[in-house]
Amino acid sequence: MAREDGRGLDELRPVTIKRHYIKHAEGSVLVATGDTHIICTASVIDQQPRFMRDQRIKNKGWVTAEYSMLPRSTSQRMQREVTRGSVGGRTQEIQRLIGRSLRAAIDLGALEEKTIWVDCDVIQADGGTRTASITGAFIALWDACQELVKSKRIESFPIIDNIAATSVGLVKGEPMLDLCYSEDSTADVDMNIVMTGSGKFIEIQGTAEEKPFSREDYDQMLDLAVGGIQQLIRLQNRMMLENLDEARIGDA
């Protein structure tokens, strides 16, 4: 089955991560996955969140996240959620997913009662916004932690593993990696997978839209996701090891 953008069934969209995108944040990136573009920033606050202070939890920090889509990130203008007076259920689900994914990558004890607040703002959406947010936010988190160590605000580097994510699905019976919006909107099954660099799973979200899917279908989709995430992890590692300001899938 041919995909509308010419990719193979097991091929990621072009992925580019550009670091130090926002001047004032301790960590920031612009991540582009095909036509999905997201700004991820990591900001350090020199205190624990209120729930930890109320519980008198000592010697432990926190990582949390917010997610939003800008009004013209889609084909028609969306109303900002702040003007509606409440955050929608989809937004709450995604920002909780981003937060717990990033917390799996970090030793919270090494943050020394600091909070890192990660903001993921979608400026252009074409499917896979939650998974691209996680992949890009990890680099922003890494840079924020590097800044904390460099400035001697914490003693040891707290990140313990990579985190990356991608989507997979069944479209007209075919398993596909990294769905764009047109594929996602017509998919028989849509799944989002979050993994660590060591190959452990943080989240597997999968839904059949009409017909149930088989164990064979699941295994095929999971294998596609693992292969795609491994490529993203290699991209992250190359950026960090070579201290690159920008890198993309397919660079030598």
Image (cartoon, rainbow, N blue to C red):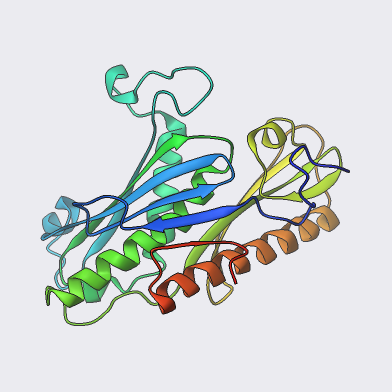
Q: Residue at x 85, y 57 (%)?
A: 216
Q: Nearer the viewer, residue 130 or 89?
A: 130
Q: Picture quarter containing residue 251?
A: bottom right
x and y percentages locating residue 42 in the rendered image: 28, 55
Q: Residue furthest bottom?
A: 156
User: Quarter of the image containing the N terminus?
Assistant: top right
Figure check: 98 above or below 210: below
What residue is shown at x 79% (from left), y 41% (from top)? 3
Q: Name the residue furthest front.
A: 252
Using the rendered view, name the quadrant where residue 109 is placed.
Answer: bottom left
| In the foreground, 27 or 220 | 27
- Residue visible at 44% across and 75% down? 161
Q: Is residue 190 left or right of residue 6?
A: left
Q: Is residue 136 left or right of residue 9?
A: left
Residue 173 at what x, y percent from top left?
A: 86, 42
- Whole-percent x and y of residue 243? 38, 73
Residue 103: percent from the left, percent from the top?
Answer: 37, 63
- Along the line of sight, which residue is nearer the eye, 215 or 80? 80
Q: Toward which corner of the image does residue 160 lie, by quadrant? A: bottom left
Q: Which quarter of the figure is the C terminus placed in?
A: bottom right
